[in-house]
C-alpha cells in the first residue's frame, strides 16, 4: 500500500516581503467551540482556521452528540452535548479535549474521558483543573487512565490556582459562568485567549470581570444565550512571522493580531538590524537578516510565550553571539534542538536551558538538511531555520505543523520564500 506522507522542502536565502493577515487563534477557537455548548441556542464562531486541531475538536464534540457544523471559515454549534462519554481515541490524541471538562460538567453534569496523557512537550498533569472543579462541588475520580467527573450542581468558590494554567482557567470560567453564586479565580491565566473567551461568554450573557488580570470574578447566571463569537488573531502565528522575517531578512507587515499581544516577542527581536514598527492594527518588520543573541526565560503571559520558544531558537542559530533560552513552562520542549543541530547549529542543552552559539559568531554557516518535526511549534522553528540556512532542507512529519498552522508553506511562499509541500511516497 502506498502511504502518502507529505514534507516541506525549503531553500534558504529568499527575503520575505509583503503584507499578511494571520488567521483566528487556534487557542482561542478551541475553547470558544466548547463555550458554544453552554447554551441550547445557536452559537457561531467565525474565522476558524482549517487546522487539524480544530477539525479534531469538532469530531470530538460530535461524538458527544453536539450539533456542530463548519460553513466556510465559520463553525456553528447548536446546543449542548447529549452524552458524557467522550470518544476515547480522539480525546486521547488531543490535549485540548481537556477543555470539555468545564463545558460538560456545566451541561451534562458528568464527564467520562480517558486521561489525555502526556505529549511530546511534557507530562501535562491536570491537578489544577481537578482541584478547581472539586472546589466548585464536582466529584472527580482520576484513575490510571480514566477521568470520571460528576456535578449535579456547581457552586461558586474562591479558587487559588497554584499556577496560572491556561486550560484550567478556561475550564473553570465555563463552570463558573453557570454555577450558583460567585467565583473568584485567583492567580488565573492572563493570556489574550482568556480575554477572548471572557468576551465571548459575556456576549452570551455571562457575568465576568477582571479578565486579563490575575483575579477574575464570575457571577453564575441561570442560562446563556446564542451569539456570534470571533476569535482573536493568532499571536503565535504572528510571532512566527516576526522570527521568520528576522532570519530571512525583508519587509513584512503583519495584520490580524493586536500588536500588544506580541510585544514580548517583538521586544526580543527588535534591534538596529530588525526594526519593528506599526500601529494598532499592524506590526511591520524590516530586517537585514542579522540577528543579535538573547537571554530569555519563557513564562505565562505577558512574558515571553513558551509557544514561541522553538521559533526563537531557530532564529538564534544565526546570531552573532551566545543566547541563553530557559524553558520554564514545559519540561520537555527542546526536541527541535537535535533537529536544528542537523543544519549545523551549535546548541547545548542542560535540563531546561538551551545555550545557542550563533553561526555569525562561530563562522559555521548552517547548511540545508533533512529534519523531522517533533511537535507543533518545534516544526515551525525548523522551518524558520531552514529559511536562513544555505541550500535545501526537507522537513518530515509535518502533520504536527498542520495542527496549528493553516498551510505554513502558503504563508511563507506568498511572502517570497522558496518553500513547497511535496508528497513523500513510502511503502507500508
Ligand atoms: C495551553 O495549553 C495551550 N494550548 C498551549 O499551546 C500553551 O503552550 C500553554 O497553554 C501555555 O501557554 C491550548 O490553549 C489548546 P497550561 P495548556 O495548563 O492549557 C502545568 C500550542 O502549541 N499544569 O497553561 O495545557 C503544565 O504541565 C500549545 O498551541 C499542571 O501542572 O497549558 C505546564 O507545565 C502547546 N497542572 C504548565 O502548567 C495542571 O492542572 C502550563 O500548562 C495544568 C497545567
Image: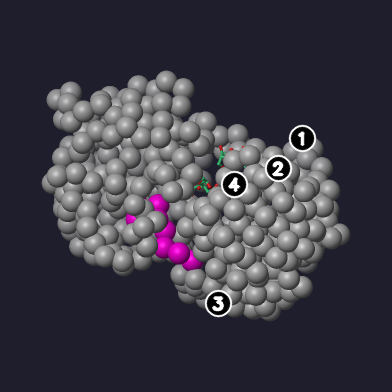
Question: Could you tell me how far apart the alpha carbons at marks 2 and 4 are, in whole angstroms?
Answer: 25 Å
For the point 55% across and 77% down, the residue is: 228
Badge 1 density bin: few <14, some 14–19, many ≥20, Cα 10 Å? few
The magenta span reads 231-240
CA–CA distance in space, label 3 to label 2? 31 Å
Q: Nearer the viewer, mark 4 or mark 3?
A: 4
Residue 228: assigned label? 3
At x 57%, y 38%, the residue is: 119
Residue density around tag 2, few if under 14, some if 14–19, many if 20 or more, within 10 Å: many
Q: Which mark is residue 187?
A: 4
User: Are circles 1 and 2 on residues that touch, CB within 8 Å?
Assistant: yes
Inspect this view and state whether residue 41 appears.
Answer: yes
Q: Give the number of the disc on residue 115.
A: 2
2 vs 4, front mark? 4
| Left or right of residue 127: residue 329 | left
Looking at the image, is mark 3 or mark 2 nearer the viewer?
3
Of residues 189 and 414, which is closer to you in this image? 189
Going from N to C along the chain, the mark reached first, 4 or 1, is 1
Are the residues at dot 2 and dot 4 in contact (C-beta closer than 8 Å)?
A: no
Front position among marks 4 and 1: 4
Q: Which residue is mark 1?
A: 144
Q: Which mark is residue 199?
A: none
For marks 4 and 1, give the CA distance: 29 Å
Question: At numbered mark 3, what does the secondary structure look like: helix, strand or loop?
Answer: strand
Compare marks 3 and 1 and give the one earlier in the sequence: 1
Report, in whole angstroms, how far the alpha carbon at label 3 lies from the one at label 1.
39 Å
Amino acid at each position: 500500500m502506498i502511504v502518502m506522507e507529505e514534507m516541506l522542502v525549503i531553500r534558504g536565502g529568499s527575503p520575505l516581503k509583503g503584507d499578511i493577515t494571520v488567521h483566528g487563534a487556534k487557542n482561542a477557537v478551541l475553547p470558544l467551540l466548547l463555550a458554544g455548548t453552554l447554551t441550547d441556542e445557536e452559537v457561531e464562531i467565525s474565522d476558524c482556521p482549517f487546522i487539524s486541531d480544530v477539525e479534531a475538536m469538532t469530531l470530538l464534540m460530535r461524538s458527544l452528540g453536539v450539533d456542530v457544523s463548519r460553513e466556510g471559515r465559520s463553525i456553528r454549534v447548536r446546543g449542548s452535548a447529549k452524552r458524557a462519554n467522550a470518544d476515547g481515541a480522539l480525546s486521547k490524541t488531543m490535549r485540548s479535549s481537556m477543555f470539555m471538562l468545564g463545558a460538560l460538567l456545566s451541561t451534562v453534569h458528568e464527564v467520562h474521558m480517558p486521561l489525555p496523557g502526556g505529549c511530546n512537550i511534557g507530562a501535562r498533569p491536570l491537578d489544577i483543573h481537578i482541584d478547581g472543579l472539586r472546589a466548585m462541588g464536582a466529584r472527580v475520580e482520576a484513575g490510571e487512565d480514566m477521568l470520571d467527573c460528576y456535578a449535579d450542581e456547581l457552586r461558586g468558590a474562591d479558587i487559588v490556582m497554584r499556577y496560572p494554567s491556561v486550560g484550567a482557567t478556561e475550564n473553570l470560567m465555563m463552570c463558573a459562568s453557570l454555577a450558583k453564586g460567585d467565583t473568584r479565580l485567583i492567580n488565573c491565566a492572563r493570556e489574550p485567549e482568556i480575554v477572548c473567551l471572557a468576551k465571548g461568554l459575556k456576549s452570551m450573557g455571562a457575568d465576568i470581570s477582571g479578565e486579563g488580570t490575575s483575579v477574575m470574578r464570575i457571577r453564575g447566571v441561570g442560562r446563556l444565550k446564542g451569539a456570534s463569537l470571533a476569535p482573536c488573531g493568532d499571536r503565535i502565528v504572528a510571532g512566527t512571522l516576526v522570527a521568520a522575517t528576522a532570519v530571512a531578512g525583508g519587509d513584512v507587515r503583519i495584520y490580524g493580531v493586536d500588536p500588544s499581544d506580541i510585544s514580548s516577542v517583538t521586544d526580543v527581536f527588535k534591534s538596529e538590524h530588525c526594526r519593528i514598527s506599526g500601529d494598532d492594527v499592524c506590526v511591520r518588520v524590516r530586517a537585514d537578516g542579522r540577528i543579535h543573541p538573547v537571554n530569555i526565560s519563557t513564562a505565562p503571559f505577558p512574558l515571553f510565550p513558551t509557544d514561541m520558544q522553538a521559533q526563537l531558537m531557530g532564529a538564534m542559530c544565526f546570531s552573532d553571539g551566545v543566547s541563553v533560552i530557559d524553558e520554564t513552562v514545559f519540561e520537555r520542549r527542546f526536541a527541535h534542538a537535535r533537529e536544528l543541530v542537523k543544519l549545523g547549529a551549535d546548541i547545548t542543552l542542560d535540563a531546561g536551558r538551551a545555550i545557542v552559539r550563533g553561526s555569525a559568531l562561530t563562522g559555521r554557516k548552517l547548511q540545508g538538511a533533512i529534519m523531522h518535526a517533533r511537535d507543533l511549534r518545534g516544526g515551525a522553528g525548523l522551518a524558520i531555520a531552514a529559511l536562513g540556512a544555505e541550500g535545501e532542507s526537507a522537513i518530515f512529519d509535518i502533520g504536527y505543523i498542520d495542527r496549528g498552522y493553516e498551510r505554513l508553506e502558503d504563508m511563507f511562499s506568498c511572502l517570497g520564500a522558496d518553500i513547497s509541500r511535496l508528497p513523500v511516497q513510502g511503502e507500508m
